[in-house]
Image (tube, helix red, strand yellow):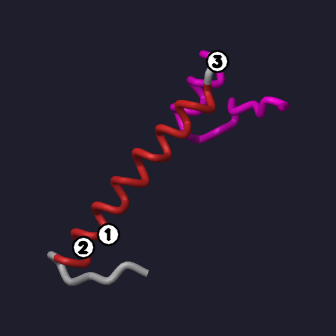
Amino acid sequence: MKRTRLEESTCPVARSLDIIGDWWSLLIVRDARYGVAVDILVAYLTDEAGIRAT
């Protein structure tokens, strides 16, 4: 598998991992973490504030 360079990425985590090495596994963890945070925010806005997510 050819490695994709992430040095031009806007994400500081991606750029750091490009330098460090084992970038793909931590990027998956990062995406999973931010995905959970978004789900929690959507649930809060829907239930508590009455705002419907699109």
Query: Could you tell me residue 33's position as x and y percent?
Result: 40, 45
Q: At label 2, which amino acid type do we have?
A: Leu
Image marks 1 and 3: residues in contact by CB distance under 8 Å: no
Q: Is mark 3 on a helix, strand or loop?
A: loop
- Look at mark 2 in the image and give the residue it sits on: 45
Query: Could you tell me residue 24's position as x and y percent?
Result: 62, 32
> Disc 2 or 3, which lies upstream in sequence?
3
- Look at mark 3 in the image and give the residue it sits on: 21
- Mark-to-mark CA distance, 2 and 3: 38 Å
Is 33 placed left or right of 45 in the picture?
Answer: right
The quarter of the picture where the N terminus appears is: top right
For the point 50% across and 46% down, the residue is 31
- Look at mark 1 in the image and give the residue it sits on: 42
- Mark-to-mark CA distance, 1 and 3: 34 Å
Q: Residues within 10 Å of mark 1 (few under 14, many from 20)?
A: some
37 w.r.t. 33: above or below: below
Image marks 2 and 3: residues in contact by CB distance under 8 Å: no
For the point 77% across and 34% down, the residue is 4
Which of the two residues, 7 or 42, is positioned nearer the viewer here? 42
The quarter of the picture where the C terminus appears is: bottom left
Q: Residues within 10 Å of mark 2 (few under 14, many from 20)?
A: some
Q: At label 1, which amino acid type do we have?
A: Val
